[in-house]
Image: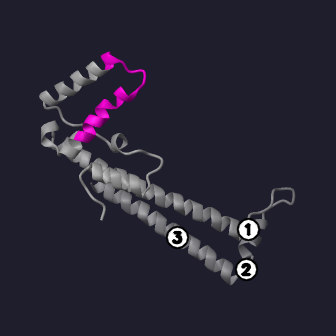
Amino acid sequence: MEDFKNNFSARRDEIYAFLKTMKLLEKNELDNPGSFSAYLQQGANSDEEPIPTYIMIANILKSDLALMLYNYIEFSVSGLLDLIYDYVQNDSLCFSKVSTDIQTLWRSKELKATNDPTSNFSTHLKINKRMIDHVLNECIIELSARDTISGGNLDYNHIDRAFKNHGMNIV
């Protein structure tokens, strides 16, 4: 939990520092129009490609900020879910000791291989046996955020669904 809090705070501070840098660049450009482009041109050769303008750099920085915010949100959501799974591991919780929502997520993870079009009846039997043995032997549930949320497009709907699948609501 401490690692998550420390990483969360460090990433938040990076975003604040980035915003402060953007504000300083904007203030400098407003106070001294063209100074930023002039600064960039100091070391440029005339044969090189055109020097980016302040507007071009500002647009790049805005895009970088959007990516930083997206990564911050994705890190937060996956980190919070992994904390839940860490508690399951640390408390040695088996199938019967976790919520029905976590049970459903575990079953879905275990059954993913059956969605493969090349899987056959033998594959289904092996997975079925492994799952039954896992439950009967009271083995500890193992999950990670990678198992339960889709990566790459974690918008509000995906986040909301991920939390609902864990029995939680976003307020």
For image coordinates 41% across by 44% down, the residue present is 150
Q: In terms of depth relative to the viewer, which is nearer, 139 or 148?
A: 148
Residue underneath mark 3: 19
Asked whether 121 falls inside the magenta stretch, the response is: yes
The colour scheme is: one colour
Labels 2 and 3: the sequence-earlier one: 3
Q: Which residues are magenta?
A: 104-123
Dot label at residue 53: 1
Q: Give the class, few, some or many, for how many residues have Cα within 10 Å of label 2's Cα (few <14, many ≥20).
A: few
Dot label at residue 33: 2
The quarter of the rendered structure image containing the C terminus is bottom left
Locate residue 54 relative to residue 115 in the image: left or right: right
Q: Give the class, few, some or many, for how many residues have Cα within 10 Å of label 3's Cα (few <14, many ≥20).
A: some
Amino acid type, callout 2 = Pro
Q: In terms of depth relative to the viewer, which is nearer, 90 or 135?
A: 135
Marks counted in the figure total 3
Locate residue 13 relative to residue 43 in the image: left or right: left
What is the secondary structure assignment of the residue under circle 3? helix
